[in-house]
């Protein structure tokens, strides 16, 4: 039992630290995932959505420090009980997502590693087994240093985790795992190769045949049935190829300018997914920065999911010299974790990104 506990202690501790750190690197991204879970279509607890960021930070900090507590042997009973509580909660979430097909990616490892809901659930079940071993053999979890050393490391890990979360929120994630990271080309990320796996769907058609409803299953073709059509349900059997960049566009109500702007050699995109929630301190910096960029020969555009009238009013209110274009809100949240956020492009390739706090760091 002692050896099983030791193995479980290392595996669980390391995995919690890695998983927690990846999410701690991007707490805003994890908060978007929590908002998805809290939404009416999933857990139906929308009153928690405004608190998603606070919950996100607390959860990921706790996840990291619990992994450290386990490895150093700090307060074993508290640590194991906490780990058990977290894994039971996560297992419920992943099972709910998988069984009811609600959330396609659990966000367990942020954007670093995408897992399907069933893969996430399987991972959590395996972790639950290891944690139950720790629960049964908690007496074998011994500290690796004296009491003062344990306290210093435990407190230090908590402060360091909070400090790191604050840093990435005030700037940008230290490590960017997304398809819009510096060096990535947006056009290339949209391409679906000719030999890419195609999605496989199952269609269940319902017809009223002689007063009785009957179902017919096909792979998409309309069945030849002597009866009255009632309805159809679709089920995805295989997802097929999913391009890294999706739902990204630069549009107006009348035209699509995506290709034209992504072919510009010197393009600055100022991104605010929702103009009403953009940070006022950041907005105040946009006039001087955008005018400077335009004078330096850059094409400057704004991207937002807000409505046309709201964009026009915003531009007039802040006396901005650039126009706003439309893009999907989820895509904009993925491009840059700031509102406003600045992205500099050269023919579609991301050259530089900045949080509004670091707007002066953009090299013009």
Image (tube, rainbow, N blue to C red):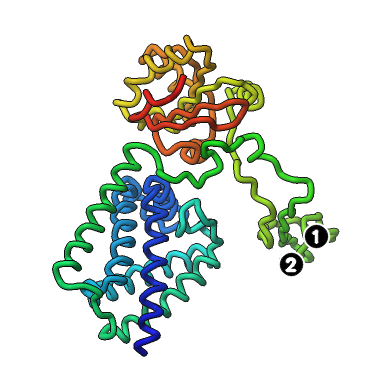
Q: Is residue 6 above or below residue 93?
A: below
| Residue at (40% x, 43% y) in the render | 173
Which of the 4 quarters of the picture holds residue 154? bottom left
Label 1 crowd bin: few (<14), some (14–19), many (20+), radius 10 Å: some
Label 2 neighbour load within 10 Å: few <14, some 14-19, many 20+: some
The single residue placed furthest to the bottom in the displayed view is 1
Taking depth in this image into account, of 245 and 6 the one nearest to the observer is: 6
**x, y percent for residue 271:** 46, 29
Relative to 218, is 105 on the left or the right?
A: left
Query: Is residue 13 shown left or right of residue 204?
Result: left
Residue ID for mark 1: 227
Residue 349, horizontal then vertical, whole percent: 59, 31
Q: Going 82% across and 58% down the picture, which residue do you hit?
A: 223
Sequence-first tag of 2 and 1: 2
Q: CA distance from mark 2 to mark 1?
A: 9 Å
| Label disc, if present, on residue 173 of the rendered structure | none
Q: Position of residue 251 (x, y in %)?
A: 59, 25
**Residue 346's x, y, as percent?**
58, 25
Which circle marks residue 214 in the picture?
A: 2
Residue appearing at x 61%, y 35% in the figure: 185
Circles 2 and 1: CB distance less than 8 Å? Answer: yes
How many marks overall?
2
Above or below — where is 263 with respect to 162? Answer: above
């Amino acid at each position: 039992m002692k050896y099983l506990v030791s193995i479980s202690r290392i595996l669980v501790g390391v995995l919690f630290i890695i998983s927690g750190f990846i999410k701690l690197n991007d707490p805003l991204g994890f908060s978007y995932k929590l908002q998805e879970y809290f939404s009416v279509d999933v857990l139906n607890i929308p009153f928690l959505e405004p608190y998603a960021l606070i919950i996100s930070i607390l959860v990921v900090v706790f996840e990291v420090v619990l992994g450290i507590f386990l490895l150093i042997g700090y307060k074993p009973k508290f640590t194991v009980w906490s780990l058990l509580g977290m894994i039971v909660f996560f297992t419920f979430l992943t099972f709910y997502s998988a069984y009811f097909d609600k959330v396609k990616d659990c966000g367990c490892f942020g954007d670093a590693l995408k897992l399907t809901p069933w893969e996430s659930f399987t991972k959590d079940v395996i972790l639950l087994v290891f944690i139950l071993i720790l629960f049964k053999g908690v007496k074998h979890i011994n500290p690796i240093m004296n009491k003062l050393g344990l306290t210093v490391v435990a407190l230090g890990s908590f402060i360091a985790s909070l400090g790191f979360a604050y840093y990435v929120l005030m700037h940008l994630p230290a490590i960017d795992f997304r398809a819009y990271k510096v060096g990535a080309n947006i056009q290339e990320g949209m391409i679906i190769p000719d030999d890419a796996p195609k999605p496989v769907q199952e269609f269940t058609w319902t017809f009223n045949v002689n007063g009785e409803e009957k179902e017919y299953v096909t792979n998409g073709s309309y069945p030849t049935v002597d009866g009255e059509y009632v309805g159809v349900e679709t089920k995805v059997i295989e997802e097929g190829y999913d391009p890294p960049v999706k739902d990204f566009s630069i549009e107006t109500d009348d035209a699509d300018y995506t290709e034209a702007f992504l072919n510009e050699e010197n393009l600055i995109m100022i991104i605010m997914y929702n103009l009403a929630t953009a940070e006022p301190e950041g907005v105040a910096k946009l006039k001087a920065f955008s005018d400077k960029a335009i004078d330096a020969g850059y094409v400057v555009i704004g991207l937002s999911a807000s409505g046309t009238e709201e964009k026009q009013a915003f531009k007039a209110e802040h006396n901005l010299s650039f126009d706003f274009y439309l893009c999907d809100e989820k895509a904009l949240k993925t491009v840059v974790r700031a509102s406003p956020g600045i992205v500099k492009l050269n023919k579609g390739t991301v050259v530089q990104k900045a949080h509004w706090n670091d707007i002066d760091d953009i090299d013009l």
